[in-house]
Structure formats: structure tokens, C-alpha cells
Image (cartoon, rainbow, N blue to C red):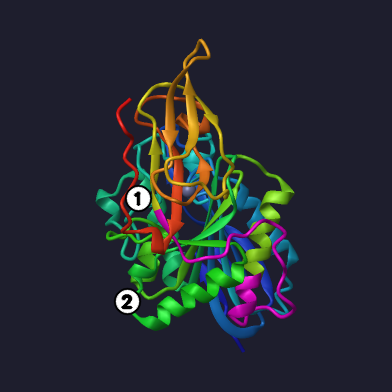
Amino acid sequence: MKPVLAIGDVVAKPGEIAKGSLGSVELADGSKSKVPLIVINGVHEGPVLALVAAIHGTEISGILAIHQVVQSLDPRKLHGSLLAIPGGNPLAIRVGAYTTPLDGKNLSGPWYLPPVQKEIATITQRLALYINEALEKANYIIDIHANPLPSIHFVLTSLEMCKTDEIKQDVKKMAKAFGLTIINWPRKEATSIRDICCKNNRPSITVELAGNIYMWDEVAMVGARGIRNVMRVLGMLEGPMEKQEVDIIEGDFTFFGWLIAQRGGFMLVRKKPGQFIKQGDVVIEIVDVYGDVIEQVRMPVNGYCWSFTGGVGGTHAVSEGDRLAYVFTHVEELGKPSFVEKPV
Ligand SMILES: [Zn+2]
């Protein structure tokens, strides 16, 4: 018989779904903001999969993906357990902010495995401390994020963070099963849950849904299907793989960089996310408040944009220095001479 699972204030016997929280932080007015947790303790033996959504408070579509997964599962048929955190940063969610307004910190930071010592931790790091409890108990982790529209659905990996080939293969297996375009982000420092978990021998992927501030079925379903597919390849769930009904770009892709505004104004997106764009082609035009084009932002490499993030909060009103779009490319494009704009 499998043991009872007790995490935070949640206790789930085998075959049970239980809801509660991993812990809470206290605010000035005495109110508490809790990190929610859903535990599904399957009847059968199997791995522990942790799901995290809304580590960034503007990326709530992953919360609905978790709801859909939880509501579709029968714990009597589940192998292993699911630890789902539907709303990782409650302080950012409550005000529709990307990071925590109270301390300005990004919950998707290097605060995990091990977490920052509680006594000296800021309020965001204390949220991470609670989330960490679930990560420590998990064998596999899916961190669900989302981009402002227009964007594509995709999965991010951090293969360079994997210390063994076995972990790397597990990450690839999870990413492939999810069923979306796969992009590797070759980072040197571990700065996200995905990076840190991989570095600590817990295979992990980040899912980036297209559409962040919405509770739309058609967005969340992509996440829910992918999560269930990962559960199938991990042996947690039976049944056929679910086909993703979105455009997928096949290839060996890597994150390249950002398109950055050199002028302030309003961005007109001239290409589609996921569309192949030739090096030097105009991707975005920035117009001033009178409608005159003041900058043409060109593609630095043969590749694609996964989203057009624009200015503060995803607005297409942009200031100079704003990261307008994320660029990714085929790995074989790296090392070729990059685009340099000729002086006019
Ligand atoms: Zn995010």
C-alpha cells in the first residue's frame, strides 16, 4: 500500500485528491497570501510530478491548464502522484503583475534547491521556500508560463543544465511528449525553476502557452493535453497520446536573443510568431504618436520570433530599450555572421 502524502497543510491518502496550501506569507494588514497546492495521490506506485503555474503573476492561463488536468484525472487509475501549484505567486496574481510588487523580485529566480534561508529571505523568496517543498519531493517538474499575444505555444529546455545524459534524455522525452515546438535555451547560470531542477537531477521543462492573461479553454487545453502526454510517457497515466491541434515547427532550435527598441513609440508587428523570417527582414516598425515610422526593427538571424512582448505589461506602446520580441533559430545558424544594419 502506498503511503499517505502530507505536504504543507494537505494530506492525501492513496486514491484521494486533496486541496490546501504549502504555506502563506503575512502582509501589513494582517492578511495572509497562500501558495495553493493540490495533491493527487494515485493508488498505484509511480513517480511524483510537480506542476507549477503563474510563477509570473500575469501568466494565469497555466492555472486553468492545471484545473483541467486535475478535473480529468481519476486517482484510482493514477500511477504515482501529482503535486500541482495552481498560482505560484499569489502576491503578483492579485494585482496582475509579472513580478512581486512588494519586493520587486522575480519568483522565477535562483531561490530553489536549496532555498534562501527563511530569516533573511524577502517575501518572494519566502514564496519560493514553500514551492521548494514540492520541488524537493518531485521526480519531474513542469513549470507552466505564458506569453502575451501574438505568440506561439512551445516548450523550453535547458539541456546544458543537465549533469548526466540520463537527465538530458528524460528532459527530451518530456518535451517531445508535450507535443509542441521545442526550443533549447543554453544558459550558463541556473536562473529558473527549469534550470535549477535540471541541475539538481530533476528533469524539468518550461511550457510557454500563447496567451497569458486569459482563462480561455482553447489556450489552457494545449497545456492540459501536454501535461497528460508527459504523464503517459512517465508511466503515470494510461491511454493514447493526445494530439496537439496547434502549429508545430520541427527542428533543432535554440534561443537567440531579443529584438530591442531603439526608439519609443508604438510597435506594428509585421511578421507572425512562428513564421520563418530571413536575416535583415523588417519584423517590427515603430511609429511615433503622429503615425510616422521612426524605426524599422530587423531580424538579426534567419529564424523566428516566438512572441511579441512589447512594452510594460505587454502593451504595444514601447519605450527605447524594451524587449519587443524573443528570437529563436536553428542551431546550425549559430556562428554565421550576424546581421549588422548599414548606416543610411
Ligand atoms: Zn513567465
Q: Is residue 23 left or right of residue 179?
A: left
Q: Residues within 10 Å of mark 1 (few under 14, many from 20)?
A: many
Q: Is residue 84 left or right of residue 222?
A: left
Q: Nearer the viewer, mark 1 or mark 2?
A: 2
Task: Tell me how far mark 1 sits from mark 2, CA to CA.
Answer: 26 Å
Task: In this rendered view, identify the residue nearer to me: 213 or 279.
Answer: 279
- Disc 1 marks which residue? 125
Range of the magenta residues?
229-255
Residue 237 image label:
none
Quarter of the image holding residue 65? Answer: bottom right
Inspect the image, locate mark 1, and give the three-letter code of the amino acid beneath it.
Gln
Is residue 75 something that shows in the picture?
yes
* Mark 1: secondary structure: helix
- The mark total stands at 2
Pointer 1 or 2: first along the chain: 1
Residue 242: horizontal and vertical position, in percent? 72, 69
Residue 25: horizontal and vertical position, in percent? 43, 46
Residue 233 falls within the magenta-colored stretch: yes
Is residue 13 something that shows in the picture?
no
Q: Residues within 10 Å of mark 2 (few under 14, many from 20)?
A: few
